[in-house]
Image: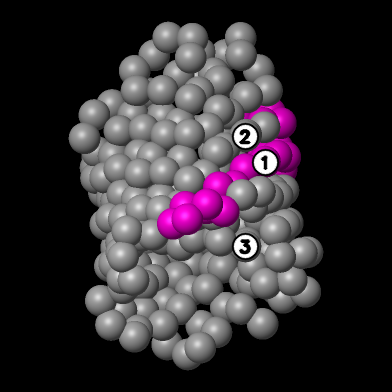
Amino acid sequence: MYRFAFAAFLGCASVAYAGRPLITNDADIVPALKLQLESGVDYTQDARDHHVNVPATLTLGITAQLEAAVSFGWQHDVSHDESDARVDENGCADVGLAAKWHFWSYEKTDHALALGINLPAASRHRGLGTGETDYDLTYILSLRVSEAVNVHLNVGYTFVGNNDDADTRDFLHYSAAVTWQLDDNLQPVLEIFTDLPTQGGKAVTAVNAGVRYQLFDNVTLDAALSTKLAGDYPDLAGTIGFTWLF
């Protein structure tokens, strides 16, 4: 239900979470008094630079309509400075806190709000984080098109801590995802998402395609690849991971 994995793909302090391997959140809630662990490995490459992120998100179902989550992780970054020397950096990722409230169901639609807070645990000096506390509010609409097909729409706004910095400006984000339950175990997923800075700068738009495979009743494996349609986005982005409900 929550996603921290692709934040590095956008090069921003994204605090929008979703069900792996998607950016787009759904209106589903972890069952009350159940825990869900999501983790994996994310990889991005842009020219000679690359970034590896190992995120983990733990979500607790509080009631049938409310859940809360905490996200953390480790990252490794390889870049090149002005003299073309290779720079390797390792360190923890930012810590994310989030909550999702499923407030309304009507016919084939479900509606939810997600609130996220990004705490600056990662080093800004080493290029691993923004060094700012960020906040995000996202509206979620999930639509059951058929027994096998679901559509999820998100519209949200991220408040970035220091808007005086051109690299850390507030942004509007929106996305749409389609999931298709092909059989009892296999679910292909596809989405398009955009980040739009609110104080100048170019929008980033990308498409993400992947698959979920239900290994056991409470364990789902996933993988996805992403590529840009517009804006400053890595040449290659991918993730592989799992979701475990217990």
Residue lying farthest left? 229
Q: Distance between the residues labelled 1 and 3?
A: 14 Å
Q: In this view, does 194 lie to the left or right of 96?
A: left
Whether residue 89 appears in this view of the structure is: no
Q: Which amino acid does label 3 sit on?
A: Ile
Quickly name the residue at label 2: 137
Q: Give the range drawn in magenta.
A: 105-134
Number of numbered markers = 3
Nearest to N terminus: mark 1 or mark 2: 1
Q: Which residue is drawn at 41% across and 29% down?
A: 195
Q: Which residue is drawn at 64% across and 52% down?
A: 102
Q: Do the residues labelled 1 and 2 touch (CB within 8 Å)?
A: yes
Toward the viewer: 166 or 148?
Answer: 148
Q: Distance between the residues labelled 1 and 2?
A: 5 Å
Quickly name the residue at label 1: 115
Nearest to N terminus: mark 1 or mark 3: 3
Quickly name the residue at label 3: 29
